[in-house]
Amino acid sequence: MVNQSSEKFDPDYVATLRKILDVAVEQIAAENRTPATKAKMAQTIVREAAEGVTDAGVLVSRAVRVGETPAA
């Protein structure tokens, strides 16, 4: 587990990450838009953000890549 400063994941930042997830979900096949796949995509976005990725386009791209394969 990575310790993050409370500033990095403040409510505004979390809202931004949620918007990134919404954009990414719209880019995957409708049949893959299950709660499990969305959760997998959200985990990818949060993990990448925690590692310092701040570019929304990169976060969307990585989440879409994960979402192309439905969660088991």
Image (cartoon, rainbow, N blue to C red):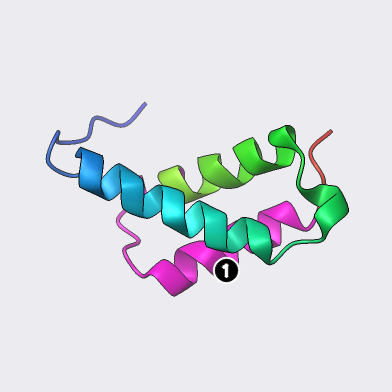
Q: Residue at x 74, y 62 (%)?
A: 28
Determine if the magenta segment contains residue 64. yes
Q: Residue at x 53, y 65 (%)?
A: 60
- The answer to whether residue 48 is visible is no
Q: Residue 72 vs residue 41: left or right?
A: right
The picture places residue 36, in percent across and down from the top left corner, at: 72, 33
Q: Is residue 68 left or right of residue 51?
A: right
Q: Does the magenta stretch mainly form a helix, a strand or a loop? A: helix
- Taking the image as shown, residue 31 lies to the left or right of residue 71, namely right
Disc 1 residue type (three-letter): Ser
In this view, which residue lies farthest toward the top? 1
Above or below for 15 versus 58: above
Q: Position of residue 1 (x, y in %)?
A: 37, 26
Q: Secondary structure at mark 1?
A: helix
Residue receiving disc 1: 61
Query: Count the marks: how many?
Result: 1
Q: Is residue 34 magenta?
A: no
* Residue in view at x 12 percent, y 41 percent: 7
The quadrant holding residue 56 is bottom left
30 horizontally vs 36: left or right: right
Residue occupying the point 54% across, 43% down: 42
- Quadrant where the C terminus lies? top right
Q: Magenta segment range?
A: 47-68
